[in-house]
Structures are given as C-alpha cells and as structure tokens.
Image (tube, rainbow, N blue to C red):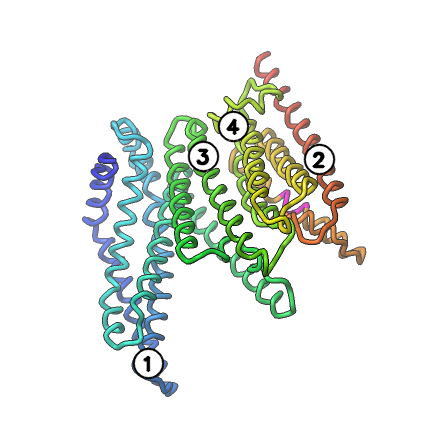
Amino acid sequence: MIERLENPVFRQSSRQRMRGARTYGCLMAYLLALGLVVVISYDQFMAVGVRRSTAGLAQTLFETLVATQWFLVAFITPALTTSAITMEREQRTYDLLIMTPLSRFAIVWGKFVSALAFVVVMILCGMPLVAVLFLMGGVDTGLMLERYAGMLITGALLAAFGLMMSAICSNTTVANVLTYGILASVYFAGVVFGIAFVMSRAFGGASVSTFWPGLGLNSWQFWLLTAVSVLLTLAILLQVAANYLLPDARQGAWKTRLLTALLHLSSLFAAVLTAKRTVFLFPVPHYLAITTVASLATIALFVSTGVPLRGRRWWQWLDPRSLKVGTVQSALLYLLLLLLAGVIADLFLPAKMRSGPVVWFYLAGYVWWIWALGYFVSVVVRNRWGALFLLVGMLYLFVQMVYNLAVFSDRRDDWLFLLNFSAPAELFRDDRSFALWGIAYVALGLTAAGLGWLIHRKRERAQAGA
C-alpha cells in the first residue's frame, strides 16, 4: 500500500508532464474553450430574447458548461495515457523501467494516477466559471457534485483504457488510432441503440427498463453497486495493462479473469435484487438469462481468443489447474463456471421469473459455440487481436445472414430472435425452440472445436518433425 502511495513512477511522470510547455498550452486552450462556450451561450440567449429569471439562466448555462467540460475531458484524457508505455519503448527506457524493483502493476498504477491527477487539475480549472454561475443562483449543490463525480469517473475509465491500449500497442500512433477508433465505435453504437430504443418506445415497443438490472434497487444499493462496478472495471483495465508488461501476458491473465468474474457476480447480485423488487410489477420469465447473457457473451469473446497453449490434449481442457494460465483452452472451464454461477443465482429468484433447465441448456450451448468458434479462429489466425475481430465479424455476419434470408423469403419467424448475438434469450419462446437451437449450437461448436484441434495437432507434429 505504501509502495502505491509513494510511487516513483507517479512522481517522475507528473514532473515530466508539468514541466512541459505543451501542458500549460493545453490548459489554456481548455479554459479558452469553456469561456467561449459560456459567452456564446449567453449571447444566444440574449439575442433571441429569452425571458427567464437569473436563476433559470444560470442553470441553463451551468448545464451547457458541464456538458462542454465533460466532452473536453473525455476527448483529452485518452491522449494523456496512450503514450505512457509506448513512449518508454520509443525512447529506449522501457527496459530500465522494467528492471526497477517495482511490480508491473505498480508501474501501471503510477502512470494512471499521474494522468488522473491532471484530469483533476482540468476539472478544478473550470471551477471559477462554475462559481460565478453558482452565485447567480439556480445551481443545486448536489447536482453539481453529481455531475463532477460522473466527470471524474469518466476521466478515470478513459485514462485506464488509454493506458491499456498503450501497453498493448507497439507505438504511440497505433495506440492513438485504436483508442479513439474504438471509442468512436462505442459512441456510434450507443447513439444507434438510443435511437432504436426511442423509436421502439414511440411505436409501442417493449421497454428494456422493465427488466434492466439495478433499476429496482434502493438509492444506496444502486450507488454502492455502481461504485463496485466502476472500481472493478478500473482494476480490470489496469491489470490487463500490467499483464502486457510481463514476458508472457498469459501469466497474469488469471488475475484479470478473477476480477471479471467478480464483476459478473455483482451483475448477478443486482439482477437478483431487482427481480425480487419488481416481481409484482413486471414478472418477466427467464429474467436472469436475459439480463446476464449479454455480459457472458462479451466475456466469452475476449477469453476465447488468443494463442492456444501447446501440448494440451482435449481432455485436459477442463482441468481446474489450467485456470492459472490464461489460455484459450482454460477459457472453456472459466465460462462454464460463470454460467454455473448464473444457474445458482437463478434459484434465488421468484418462481415466476426463473429460467427452466432447457433455457440454461440453450445458453450453455450458445457459450460453448462462441468458445469453440473463438478457439478455431485463434488456431487459424494465431494472433490474439486478429482472432478477436474475426470472431466478432463472423458472429455478426451469421446473425445478419440468417435474418436477411428470412426477410428475403418474407418469413419472420420467432426463432430468429434466438440467433441475436447481444441477447439470444428472448421472451415468450417455447422450450422446443430452446432445445432445438441448444442442440444446434452444441453441434456447431463440436465441429468448430474439432477442426481447430485437428489443425493445432497437425502443426505441433510438423514442428516436432522439423
């Protein structure tokens, strides 16, 4: 604990950042942008002749200022950490950094806290503008603290994500392109999902909020679980960055998987509490299967791709000792344990909202199919990130192909929703459909895993013969 508080990497990174003229130029541009937004917004309100009280005007300007400040923090923060590790490699100081007595996580922690400290400086620099609006009245103290807490959490998550990409990538340019490209894709997907949700509500669609985990909790329960989820997410991102500082990233992957399992368990806990509070209002069948399958499928994407461990026989894939090494083969047992946790949590739900054995068999087949497909593409591609992107593309094309064939034939069967990658367990499906598609996923997974195993064994024999 003392090592993390008195971190030499933090001191060195902070001094190096604050000694450069670029840092103060960035702060000046940041404050200039905030000031221009306030002045332009005020002139626009006066030009159109908006008649409102001083308190109402201050509240509107406050929301505009906070939105602008939030955007600037989200845009600048990743750039603070995408060069944290790659710059060490480019300046030939990486080996000296690794040779220090500090642990890999302590190095990552020092880089992260240094960037987070600068984010706090940026937030505090905008406080004088907020203070003027606060004196005008209409700005609630609780609302202000809530906005800035969210801004700080956003900055922390983006700083950790940029640091992770810096540890993964070989140079700063690639780290910047991938970081901002992924963030732009996530933002675009969020906008599309939001538009689709609003349109579905406008035309009488079902509301996702009726079974979204966490919405039925008390205020303190919601904030406690949110804080736990944020801390676990930060720990996962920083641990991944620390793993890539090791000679083999798979050596520390068990820590990442443990943190991910804790995050999944927290979502199960939130779902159970929500189900008990909303059972009388919205008794949704298969509740836990619906609310947790998206996170389970996302975890399966990342743990099912990588470089397979050599010398492993297929009957050793379920060996509990293999969980210590983050290989593709050990991911199968890891995913089955997460699924078993969901089955156990389902027993604590009200009877109206439980999932039957057929539904869990379907989900097990679905997870098995994703893992087998990830194992196959990992063997073929032999590159972690190439296999990950190829797996995501294959799953997306599979869903779209089947759906487009149904549209072309003018048939929109209910079982098409069972192919939905993001939420395969839909409402109001019969057990026969779940059983048939569970068997189909098991068969497809056996085919993919068998082909991958044959290719893997053939390569091992060829290398042994050479």
Q: What amino acid type is highlighted by mark number 4?
A: Thr
Disc on res. 444 = 2
> Please, what secondary structure does the residue beneath circle 2 have?
helix
> Please, what secondary structure does the residue beneath circle 1 have?
helix
Displayed quadrant of residue 48: bottom left
Q: What amino acid type is highlighted by mark number 3?
A: Leu
Marks 4 and 2, how far apart at CA? 22 Å
Counting residues from the N terminus, which is met first, the one under dot 4 or under dot 1? 1
Rendered residue at 59%/58% (across/down)? 280
Marks 1 and 2, how far apart at CA? 63 Å
Disc on res. 327 = 4
Marks 4 and 1, how far apart at CA? 59 Å
Residue 52 x, y percent position in the rendering: 35, 84
Task: State whether residue 423 appears in this view.
Answer: no
Q: Which dot, 2 or 3, sits closer to the camera? A: 3
Local crowd size for mark 4, using a 10 Å CA cut-off: few (<14), some (14–19), many (≥20): many
Q: What amino acid type is highlighted by mark number 2?
A: Leu
Q: Which residue is mark 1?
A: 43
Of the 4 image quadrants, the one containing the C terminus is: top right
Residue range of the region highlighted in magenta in the rendering: 394-398
Magenta-colored stretch includes residue 31: no
Marks 4 and 3, how far apart at CA? 14 Å
